[in-house]
Image (cartoon, coloured by chain):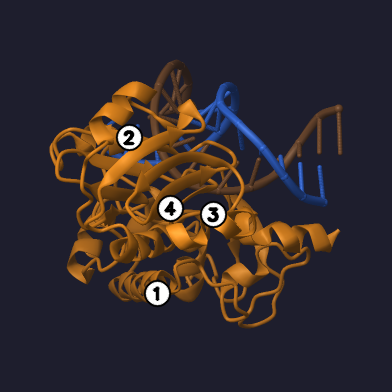
Chain colours: A orange, B brown, C blue
Amino acid sequence: MHQSRDANSAWSVAVPELPDVEGQRRSLTISLLGRTVLDVTVLDPRVLRNATQSEFEQRLIGCRFGPPARHGKWLILPTDRVTLLLHNGMTGRVYFLAAGALGSETTASPPGNRLIVRVEGGQLRFTDRRALGGVWIADHPGVDIVAITGLQGPDALGIPLGVFQTLLRGRRATVKSTLMDQSVIAGLGNMLSDEICWRARLHPSRAAASLSAEETQKLHRALRWTTRRASECGLIPRTPTWLSSARDKDPAACPRCKAGLRRSRIRGRTALWCPRCQPDNP
DNA sequence: GAGGTTGTTTAGAA
DNA sequence: CTTCTAAACAACCT
């Protein structure tokens, strides 16, 4: 029934990609910066991915948060002594709950609380109902981070055209695969890569290296516009001018030309594309 | 009640 | 080296 889906959609449909993490980063810059950790409550030890509960507490308590950063889908929370690295997985979410809002937490907070870091004036919370995300702690900010995140390409938000061209060069995979490969470009997931291909009017199965100079430029413009716009919103918009708005529809129509959308399998993911707007032979 | 869905890691194959 | 597939992880949906 559509009712339960609508009721759940606020938490269950929003799969975290770059825009969601960027929204979290912006929000935490305002609420968390400069605050000191008072204590830690680990509600689910599985979220701590490289430390035991007691190690985590000992290392984090007393630390003062610096300016939050982000690379791709990774949220980076530096403090004066350690750095926290958070990945949302499929359903993860990081947010600050001000002390004054604690009373309304049952209705205001998403389900699946895993970790609460109490600071002066409120709490930093990590919720993740499916527990595919996690929290890592690193001793030296900037040094051992790559060992945790794995190789990450340049962040998708604000990538220059010249860099983008270089990244695509000599790549045999499809456009969509390449966009989703975190070691090539960091931050794009299944939805955003579909959205970008659709806006660039390029078939997701086109080989990345086969794009003409003009097509590469179109793809770059779509990448830049889409990531900027979605990041401002803090999520991928589901408004009628976005491909995402057709994502859960049963017979899905292209928001632009109303043609029936097609679904195919690319690198184990369901790609959504318009056969009229995105021809496979240009 | 089986199958699909999401992101990442890992193993294995082409 | 590059790329893809499938499984695993978890929990919800149809």
Camera-nearest label, 2 or 4: 2
The front one of A37 and A174 is: A37
> Pointer 1: residues within 10 angstroms few (<14), some, or many (20+)?
some
x and y percent of residue A140 in the render?
13, 36
Describe residue A130's horizontal placement relative to residue A225 as left or right. Answer: right
Give a yes or no on whether discs 4 and 3 share a subunit.
Answer: yes
Which mark is drawn over residue A15?
Answer: 3
Q: Which of marks 1 and 4 is nearer the N terminus?
A: 4
The front one of A63 and A227 is: A63
Camera-nearest label, 3 or 2: 2
Describe residue A166's horizontal placement relative to residue A4 as left or right. Answer: left
The CA distance from mark 1 to mark 4 is: 28 Å
Q: Is residue A113 above or below residue A278?
A: above
The CA distance from mark 2 to mark 4 is: 32 Å
Mark 1 secondary-structure assignment = helix
x and y percent of residue A219 in the render?
37, 70
Give a yes or no on whether discs 3 and 2 share a subunit.
Answer: yes
Q: Which of marks 4 and 3 is nearer the N terminus?
A: 3
Type of the residue with mark 2:
Trp
x and y percent of residue A13 in the render?
62, 57
Q: Residue at x 63, y 71 (%)?
A: A245
Type of the residue with mark 3:
Val
Describe residue A100's horizontal placement relative to residue A145 as left or right. Answer: right
Type of the residue with mark 1:
Glu
